[in-house]
Image (cartoon, rainbow, N blue to C red):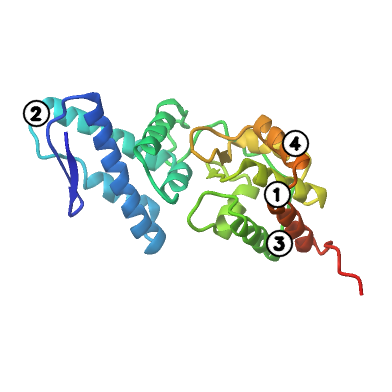
Amino acid sequence: MVFSLFGGNLHTHHFATEQDVADELFALLSEARELYLRDVITNGKRYDRYVADFVNSHRYIDCNKAVCRNCHEMNIHIVRGLLRNCPALIKSFFTADAFSLEDCMRLKREYDFRKFSPGSPGAESSVHTPSLSFGCNFSGEQMKSIVACATAYHLFRVSTLRIEDMEALFACREGFCIRVNNVRHVAILFDALLEHRLIQPYWQSVLDKGRFLLAKDGSKHVSASNLSTALSAARIRMTSVAHGIRKAVAEMTGSAEKPSM
Protein backbone atom coordinates (compact mmCIF):
# COMPACT_ATOMS: atom_id res chain seq x y z
CA MET A 1 0.00 0.00 0.00
CA VAL A 2 1.19 3.52 -0.78
CA PHE A 3 0.89 6.53 1.54
CA SER A 4 1.38 10.11 0.45
CA LEU A 5 0.88 13.55 1.93
CA PHE A 6 -0.86 16.32 0.04
CA GLY A 7 -1.56 19.66 1.71
CA GLY A 8 -1.51 18.12 5.18
CA ASN A 9 -3.94 15.30 4.34
CA LEU A 10 -2.97 11.64 4.40
CA HIS A 11 -4.11 9.73 1.30
CA THR A 12 -4.09 5.95 1.48
CA HIS A 13 -4.91 2.90 -0.52
CA HIS A 14 -6.47 -0.04 1.31
CA PHE A 15 -4.83 -1.75 4.28
CA ALA A 16 -3.85 -5.29 3.38
CA THR A 17 -0.88 -6.23 5.60
CA GLU A 18 0.73 -5.35 8.94
CA GLN A 19 3.38 -3.48 6.97
CA ASP A 20 0.64 -1.24 5.59
CA VAL A 21 -0.33 -0.32 9.14
CA ALA A 22 3.31 0.41 10.03
CA ASP A 23 3.77 2.49 6.87
CA GLU A 24 0.76 4.65 7.70
CA LEU A 25 1.98 5.18 11.28
CA PHE A 26 5.35 6.25 9.89
CA ALA A 27 3.65 8.65 7.47
CA LEU A 28 1.59 10.15 10.29
CA LEU A 29 4.56 10.60 12.63
CA SER A 30 6.70 11.97 9.80
CA GLU A 31 4.12 14.66 9.10
CA ALA A 32 3.74 15.29 12.85
CA ARG A 33 7.51 15.82 13.02
CA GLU A 34 7.47 18.23 10.08
CA LEU A 35 4.69 20.29 11.67
CA TYR A 36 6.37 20.15 15.09
CA LEU A 37 9.61 21.59 13.71
CA ARG A 38 7.74 24.29 11.78
CA ASP A 39 4.95 25.25 14.16
CA VAL A 40 6.38 24.60 17.62
CA ILE A 41 10.15 24.98 17.24
CA THR A 42 10.27 27.69 14.56
CA ASN A 43 7.03 29.59 15.09
CA GLY A 44 6.56 29.07 18.84
CA LYS A 45 3.11 27.49 18.71
CA ARG A 46 1.86 26.09 22.01
CA TYR A 47 2.60 22.38 22.18
CA ASP A 48 -0.85 21.39 23.43
CA ARG A 49 -2.46 23.38 20.59
CA TYR A 50 -0.17 21.70 18.06
CA VAL A 51 -1.17 18.25 19.37
CA ALA A 52 -4.89 19.03 19.30
CA ASP A 53 -4.72 20.51 15.81
CA PHE A 54 -2.73 17.60 14.40
CA VAL A 55 -4.95 14.89 15.86
CA ASN A 56 -8.19 16.63 14.92
CA SER A 57 -7.02 17.19 11.34
CA HIS A 58 -6.17 13.51 10.85
CA ARG A 59 -9.18 11.75 12.33
CA TYR A 60 -10.62 10.43 9.07
CA ILE A 61 -9.44 8.82 5.86
CA ASP A 62 -11.14 8.75 2.48
CA CYS A 63 -12.24 5.13 2.76
CA ASN A 64 -15.42 3.42 3.98
CA LYS A 65 -13.94 -0.06 4.46
CA ALA A 66 -14.18 -1.06 8.13
CA VAL A 67 -10.74 -2.64 8.25
CA CYS A 68 -9.09 0.50 6.86
CA ARG A 69 -10.97 2.82 9.19
CA ASN A 70 -10.15 0.63 12.20
CA CYS A 71 -6.45 0.48 11.34
CA HIS A 72 -6.31 4.24 10.88
CA GLU A 73 -8.14 4.82 14.18
CA MET A 74 -5.61 2.58 15.93
CA ASN A 75 -2.68 4.54 14.46
CA ILE A 76 -4.23 7.89 15.40
CA HIS A 77 -4.71 6.56 18.93
CA ILE A 78 -0.99 5.70 19.08
CA VAL A 79 0.05 9.08 17.70
CA ARG A 80 -2.24 10.92 20.12
CA GLY A 81 -0.86 8.91 23.06
CA LEU A 82 2.74 9.59 22.11
CA LEU A 83 2.21 13.30 21.50
CA ARG A 84 0.18 13.88 24.67
CA ASN A 85 1.98 11.59 27.13
CA CYS A 86 5.58 11.60 25.90
CA PRO A 87 6.45 15.21 24.94
CA ALA A 88 10.09 14.89 25.99
CA LEU A 89 10.51 11.63 24.09
CA ILE A 90 8.81 13.15 21.04
CA LYS A 91 11.14 16.13 21.19
CA SER A 92 14.24 13.93 21.32
CA PHE A 93 13.15 12.01 18.22
CA PHE A 94 11.64 14.89 16.24
CA THR A 95 14.61 17.25 16.68
CA ALA A 96 17.15 14.61 15.61
CA ASP A 97 18.78 15.02 12.21
CA ALA A 98 16.57 12.35 10.62
CA PHE A 99 13.47 10.29 11.36
CA SER A 100 13.31 6.76 9.95
CA LEU A 101 10.83 3.90 9.95
CA GLU A 102 13.05 2.28 12.59
CA ASP A 103 12.69 5.39 14.78
CA CYS A 104 8.94 5.17 14.27
CA MET A 105 8.90 1.58 15.51
CA ARG A 106 11.00 2.51 18.55
CA LEU A 107 8.46 5.17 19.45
CA LYS A 108 5.67 2.63 19.08
CA ARG A 109 7.50 0.24 21.41
CA GLU A 110 7.80 3.03 23.97
CA TYR A 111 4.07 3.59 23.65
CA ASP A 112 3.36 -0.14 24.02
CA PHE A 113 5.44 -0.70 27.14
CA ARG A 114 5.70 2.64 28.98
CA LYS A 115 3.46 3.20 31.98
CA PHE A 116 1.57 6.48 32.19
CA SER A 117 0.27 8.24 35.29
CA PRO A 118 -3.50 7.69 35.30
CA GLY A 119 -5.64 10.74 34.63
CA SER A 120 -2.67 12.97 33.89
CA PRO A 121 -2.41 13.85 30.17
CA GLY A 122 1.08 15.05 29.36
CA ALA A 123 2.66 13.25 32.31
CA GLU A 124 5.16 10.54 31.59
CA SER A 125 5.84 7.33 33.44
CA SER A 126 5.44 7.38 37.20
CA VAL A 127 8.94 5.93 37.56
CA HIS A 128 10.19 9.53 37.74
CA THR A 129 10.58 10.55 41.37
CA PRO A 130 10.23 14.21 42.40
CA SER A 131 12.87 13.72 45.12
CA LEU A 132 15.61 12.99 42.57
CA SER A 133 18.36 15.61 42.66
CA PHE A 134 21.98 16.11 41.61
CA GLY A 135 22.45 18.48 44.53
CA CYS A 136 23.55 21.25 42.18
CA ASN A 137 22.87 24.98 42.06
CA PHE A 138 24.42 26.38 38.89
CA SER A 139 24.58 30.08 38.20
CA GLY A 140 23.28 31.44 34.91
CA GLU A 141 26.83 31.78 33.59
CA GLN A 142 27.72 28.24 34.64
CA MET A 143 24.64 26.87 32.88
CA LYS A 144 25.59 28.77 29.72
CA SER A 145 29.07 27.24 29.95
CA ILE A 146 27.63 23.73 30.28
CA VAL A 147 25.44 24.27 27.21
CA ALA A 148 28.42 25.68 25.27
CA CYS A 149 30.55 22.67 26.23
CA ALA A 150 27.81 20.18 25.36
CA THR A 151 27.24 21.91 22.03
CA ALA A 152 30.95 22.17 21.15
CA TYR A 153 31.50 18.44 21.74
CA HIS A 154 28.11 17.28 20.39
CA LEU A 155 27.16 15.50 23.61
CA PHE A 156 23.45 15.31 22.83
CA ARG A 157 21.57 14.29 19.71
CA VAL A 158 19.46 17.41 19.15
CA SER A 159 19.54 19.95 16.35
CA THR A 160 19.97 22.87 18.78
CA LEU A 161 20.74 22.40 22.47
CA ARG A 162 18.99 25.03 24.58
CA ILE A 163 19.67 26.26 28.10
CA GLU A 164 16.14 25.09 28.93
CA ASP A 165 17.17 21.52 28.06
CA MET A 166 20.07 21.51 30.49
CA GLU A 167 18.02 23.28 33.15
CA ALA A 168 15.41 20.53 32.85
CA LEU A 169 18.08 17.81 33.04
CA PHE A 170 19.88 19.17 36.10
CA ALA A 171 16.59 20.02 37.79
CA CYS A 172 15.53 16.36 37.29
CA ARG A 173 12.32 17.58 35.69
CA GLU A 174 9.74 14.81 35.59
CA GLY A 175 9.20 13.45 32.09
CA PHE A 176 12.35 15.00 30.61
CA CYS A 177 14.77 12.88 28.59
CA ILE A 178 17.34 13.59 25.92
CA ARG A 179 19.30 11.43 23.47
CA VAL A 180 23.07 11.24 23.84
CA ASN A 181 25.56 11.08 21.02
CA ASN A 182 28.31 9.39 23.03
CA VAL A 183 27.76 7.95 26.52
CA ARG A 184 31.48 8.21 27.36
CA HIS A 185 31.57 11.93 26.69
CA VAL A 186 28.42 12.58 28.73
CA ALA A 187 29.88 10.52 31.58
CA ILE A 188 33.07 12.59 31.43
CA LEU A 189 31.02 15.79 31.73
CA PHE A 190 29.25 14.58 34.86
CA ASP A 191 32.48 13.18 36.32
CA ALA A 192 34.19 16.54 35.77
CA LEU A 193 31.29 18.34 37.47
CA LEU A 194 31.66 15.94 40.40
CA GLU A 195 35.42 16.52 40.52
CA HIS A 196 34.77 20.23 41.04
CA ARG A 197 32.05 19.49 43.62
CA LEU A 198 29.28 20.92 41.48
CA ILE A 199 27.13 17.78 41.74
CA GLN A 200 26.84 14.88 44.20
CA PRO A 201 28.59 11.47 43.83
CA TYR A 202 25.32 9.62 43.17
CA TRP A 203 24.77 11.28 39.75
CA GLN A 204 24.81 7.92 37.93
CA SER A 205 21.97 6.63 40.07
CA VAL A 206 19.95 9.82 39.53
CA LEU A 207 20.29 9.57 35.74
CA ASP A 208 19.30 5.90 35.89
CA LYS A 209 16.29 6.26 38.17
CA GLY A 210 15.03 9.35 36.39
CA ARG A 211 15.52 7.78 32.94
CA PHE A 212 16.75 11.16 31.74
CA LEU A 213 19.14 9.88 29.06
CA LEU A 214 18.29 7.93 25.92
CA ALA A 215 20.84 5.92 23.95
CA LYS A 216 21.98 7.40 20.65
CA ASP A 217 19.60 5.21 18.65
CA GLY A 218 16.72 5.93 21.01
CA SER A 219 16.17 2.24 21.69
CA LYS A 220 16.69 2.30 25.47
CA HIS A 221 17.46 4.48 28.46
CA VAL A 222 21.06 4.83 29.62
CA SER A 223 21.52 2.95 32.89
CA ALA A 224 23.89 3.51 35.80
CA SER A 225 25.79 0.43 34.62
CA ASN A 226 26.15 1.92 31.14
CA LEU A 227 27.50 5.14 32.62
CA SER A 228 29.92 3.38 34.96
CA THR A 229 31.30 1.21 32.15
CA ALA A 230 31.60 4.20 29.82
CA LEU A 231 33.41 6.28 32.42
CA SER A 232 35.88 3.49 33.19
CA ALA A 233 36.65 3.10 29.50
CA ALA A 234 37.01 6.87 29.06
CA ARG A 235 39.48 7.07 31.95
CA ILE A 236 41.61 4.28 30.52
CA ARG A 237 41.85 5.98 27.15
CA MET A 238 41.50 9.73 27.51
CA THR A 239 40.78 11.34 24.15
CA SER A 240 41.16 14.97 23.08
CA VAL A 241 37.40 15.38 23.47
CA ALA A 242 37.51 14.08 27.04
CA HIS A 243 40.37 16.47 27.86
CA GLY A 244 38.44 19.29 26.23
CA ILE A 245 35.32 18.61 28.31
CA ARG A 246 37.32 18.49 31.55
CA LYS A 247 39.10 21.71 30.64
CA ALA A 248 35.78 23.43 29.87
CA VAL A 249 34.37 22.45 33.27
CA ALA A 250 37.55 23.60 35.01
CA GLU A 251 37.37 26.97 33.25
CA MET A 252 33.71 27.24 34.22
CA THR A 253 34.70 27.00 37.89
CA GLY A 254 37.72 29.25 37.51
CA SER A 255 40.09 26.47 38.46
CA ALA A 256 41.78 25.91 35.12
CA GLU A 257 45.55 26.02 35.19
CA LYS A 258 46.89 29.40 34.14
CA PRO A 259 49.92 29.50 31.83
CA SER A 260 53.20 30.28 33.62
CA MET A 261 54.76 33.67 33.02
In three-dimensional space, the C-alpha distance between marks 4 and 2, rounded to whole angstroms, equals 58 Å
Residue at image mark 4: 232
- Horizontal and vertical percent position of residue 240: 71, 53
In primary-sequence order, the first of circles 3 and 1 is 3
In primary-sequence order, the first of circles 3 and 4 is 3
SS at circle 4: helix
In primary-sequence order, the first of circles 2 and 3 is 2
In three-dimensional space, the C-alpha distance between marks 3 and 1, rounded to whole angstroms, equals 13 Å
At label 4, which amino acid type do we have?
Ser
In primary-sequence order, the first of circles 1 and 2 is 2
Answer left or right for 119 relative to 50. right
Question: Crowding near pointer 3: few (<14 within 10 Å), some, many (20+)?
Answer: some
In three-dimensional space, the C-alpha distance between marks 3 and 4, rounded to whole angstroms, equals 26 Å
The image's mark for residue 15 is: none
Question: In this rendering, which labeled residue sits more in front, label 3 or label 1?
Answer: 1
SS at circle 2: loop
In three-dimensional space, the C-alpha distance between marks 4 and 1, rounded to whole angstroms, equals 13 Å
At label 3, which amino acid type do we have?
Gln
Is label 4 in contact with label 1 (beta carbons under 8 Å)? no
Is label 4 in contact with label 2 (beta carbons under 8 Å)? no
The image's mark for residue 65 is: 2
SS at circle 1: helix
Q: Residue at x 20, y 40 (%)?
A: 59
Is label 3 in contact with label 4 (beta carbons under 8 Å)? no
The image's mark for residue 189 is: 1
* One can see residue 59 in this view: yes
At label 1, which amino acid type do we have?
Leu
Question: In this rendering, which labeled residue sits more in front, label 3 or label 4?
Answer: 4
Question: In this rendering, which labeled residue sits more in front, label 4 or label 1?
Answer: 4
Residue at image mark 3: 142
In primary-sequence order, the first of circles 4 and 2 is 2
Q: Residue at x 64, y 34 (%)?
A: 208
